[in-house]
Amino acid sequence: MTTEEQMKFSQRYARFNTQPQTLLGKLLTLVLGAAFLVLAFMFSLVALTVVAIGGVMLWGWLWWKTRAIRKQMREQGRQTATDGYIIEGEVIRETDSPPQSGRLLR
C-alpha cells in the first residue's frame, strides 16, 4: 500500500482508529454488554412463551373441532368389531391387448 492509500483507508475507517479505552470505559462496555445479553435472553424467553401458548391454543381448537369426527370413528370401529367379518381384497386385471405405446394403462 502506498502512503496515499493508507491515508484514504484511515480516513474512511477513522471511527475504528480510537485510542485504547480506560478502565472505566472497559467496565462500562462490560456492563452494557452483559445488560444487552440479559435483555436478549429475556426477549427470547418471551417470544418462545408466546409461540408455545399459541401452539397449545391451536391444538386445543383443533381437538375441540374434531371431537364429533373422533366419536364417529370410535363408533364405526365398535360396529366393525361386532359384525364379525372384514372383507379385504386385491384385484388383478388381465387384458389380452398390449398397452398402447406412449400411454399409461387405464
Image: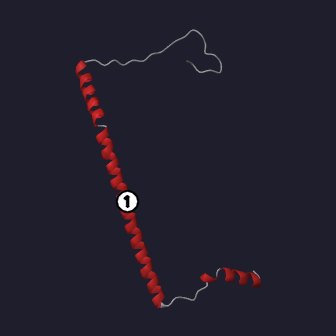
Mark 1 residue crowding within 10 angstroms, few (<14) / some (14–19) / many (20+): few
Q: x, y (%) of residue 79?
A: 24, 23
Tag 1 residue: 48
Q: Residue at x 57, y 89 (%)?
A: 19
Question: Given the current orientation, which residue lies at the most extreme top position?
Answer: 96
- Taking depth in this image into account, of 90 and 4 the one nearest to the observer is 4
Q: In terms of depth relative to the viewer, which is nearer, 1 or 52? A: 52
Q: Where residue 97 sits in the image (x, y, percent)?
A: 59, 10
Residue most extreme to the left: 82
Q: Residue at x 34, y 17 (%)?
A: 87
Q: Is residue 65 above or below residue 74?
A: below
The residue located at (55%, 10%) in the rendering is 95
Decide: is 37 above or below 21. Answer: above
Quarter occupied by residue 77: top left
Tell me the amino acid under the disc marked 1. Answer: Leu
Residue 71 horizontal/vertical position (percent): 26, 32
Coloration of the structure image: secondary structure
Left or right for 41, reference 105: left
- Name the image quarter holding the C terminus: top right
Closest to the observer: 30 or 75? 75
Q: Is residue 91 left or right of residue 95?
A: left
Q: Is residue 39 left or right of residue 10?
A: left
Q: Quadrant of the N terminus?
A: bottom right
Q: Position of residue 4 (x, y in %)?
A: 76, 83
Q: Is residue 11 above or below residue 70?
A: below
Number of residue marks: 1
- What SS does tag 1 mark? helix
